Image: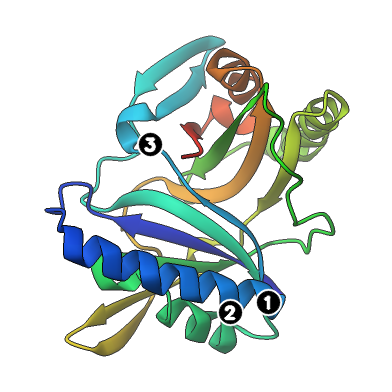
């Protein structure tokens, strides 16, 4: 079973050189262990929310907003895709990650198991972006709209992959299947649900490699979900 780790931190957290060095040491150890065991398939830090752009389309009008899809204390700072036999094991690996020392990790199953989960080496002439697909799970769509989302998304994926830009992507299971893990006073605390109780929740992700931000934003605006949800576009670190 494949799971996404959504790493979240408070970007206003006061930095400390000694703690940063400790976190890097723990991270290096965690990556070595998970990669050598075949658990970790891919992952990356993301640029801060000051580099994020959120795309929405309403009545054929594209709106670009600087910043993340939602204003919360903790924001998405990175991700990992892992493969584990159960949610319990996915949570156990997450508990060892240093993000839990300064933030939280939302663990969410991928809706579908994806064959090409390992990313190729990055090309020197392109940039990588995470497209975070966000929707309000309570939104009411007409039967015609619901029926059209699947084929429209498939067409979007086919075009992006045909141009060699979409390297990876998947829907996530509903936010009700999320588990969020934090460590407090040395104790591991796992709560049901996503890292933030917000109107819009992360429903899927796409990893793009393209010439520049304008190209990524153009494809984000053409995603079917942009007409009733939002797509946050964030560069890889």
Asked if the residues shown at circle 2 and circle 1 are in contact, with their CB atoms under 8 angstroms apart, the answer is: yes
Residue 33: assigned label:
2
Q: Give above or below for 48 relative to 181.
A: above
Residue 67 or residue 152, whichever sits in front: 67
Indicate the secondary structure of the residue bearing disc 2.
helix
What is the secondary structure assignment of the residue under circle 1? helix
Residue at 58 percent across and 56 percent down: it is 43
User: How many angstroms separate mark 3 from mark 1 (CA)?
Assistant: 35 Å
- Do the residues bearing badges 3 and 2 touch, measured as CB atoms within 8 Å? no
Picture quadrant of residue 83: bottom right
Give the x, y percent position of residue 132: 52, 41
Q: Is residue 127 left or right of residue 25?
A: right
- What residue is drawn where x is 54% and y is 67%? 108
Q: Is residue 112 visible?
A: yes
| Mark number displayed over residue 36 | 1
* Residue picked out by circle 3: 69
The residue drawn where x is 76% and y is 45% is: 120
Count residues near mark 1 (Cα–Cα under 10 Å), then give few for <14, some for 14-19, many for 20+.
few
Where residue 195 sits: x, y (%)? 35, 62
Question: Who is closer to the viewer here, 187 or 197?
Answer: 187
Could you say whether the residue bearing mark 3 is in a helix, strand or loop?
loop
Q: Tell me if 16 is positioned left or right of 141 in this view.
A: left
Answer above or below: position of 136 versus 64. Answer: below
Q: Are there few (<14), some (14-19), or many (20+) residues within 10 Å of tag 2?
A: some
Alpha carbon of mark 3 to alpha carbon of mark 2: how far? 33 Å
**Left or right: 152 as drawn, with respect to 141:** right
């Amino acid at each position: 079973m494949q799971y996404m780790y959504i790493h979240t931190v408070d970007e206003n957290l006061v930095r400390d050189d000694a703690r940063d060095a400790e976190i890097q040491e723990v991270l290096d150890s965690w990556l070595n262990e998970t990669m050598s065991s075949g658990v970790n398939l891919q992952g990356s830090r993301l640029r801060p929310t000051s580099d994020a752009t959120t795309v929405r389309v309403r009545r054929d009008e594209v709106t670009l907003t600087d910043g993340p899809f939602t204003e919360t204390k903790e924001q998405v700072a990175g991700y990992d895709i892992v493969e584990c036999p159960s949610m319990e094991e996915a949570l156990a690996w997450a508990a060892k990650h240093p993000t839990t020392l300064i933030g939280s990790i939302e663990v969410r199953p991928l809706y579908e198991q994806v064959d090409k989960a390992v990313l190729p080496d990055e090309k020197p002439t392109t940039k990588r972006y995470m497209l975070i697909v966000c929707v309000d799970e309570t939104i009411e769509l007409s039967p015609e709209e619901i029926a059209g989302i699947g084929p429209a998304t498939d067409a979007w994926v086919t075009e992006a992959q045909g141009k060699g830009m979409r390297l990876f992507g998947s829907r996530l299971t509903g936010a009700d299947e999320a588990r969020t893990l934090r460590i407090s006073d040395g104790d591991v605390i796992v709560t049901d649900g996503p890292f933030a109780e917000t109107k819009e929740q992360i429903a899927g992700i796409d990893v793009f490699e393209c010439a520049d931000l304008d190209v990524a934003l153009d494809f984000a605006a053409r995603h079917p979900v942009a007409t009733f949800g939002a797509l946050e576009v964030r560069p890889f670190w």
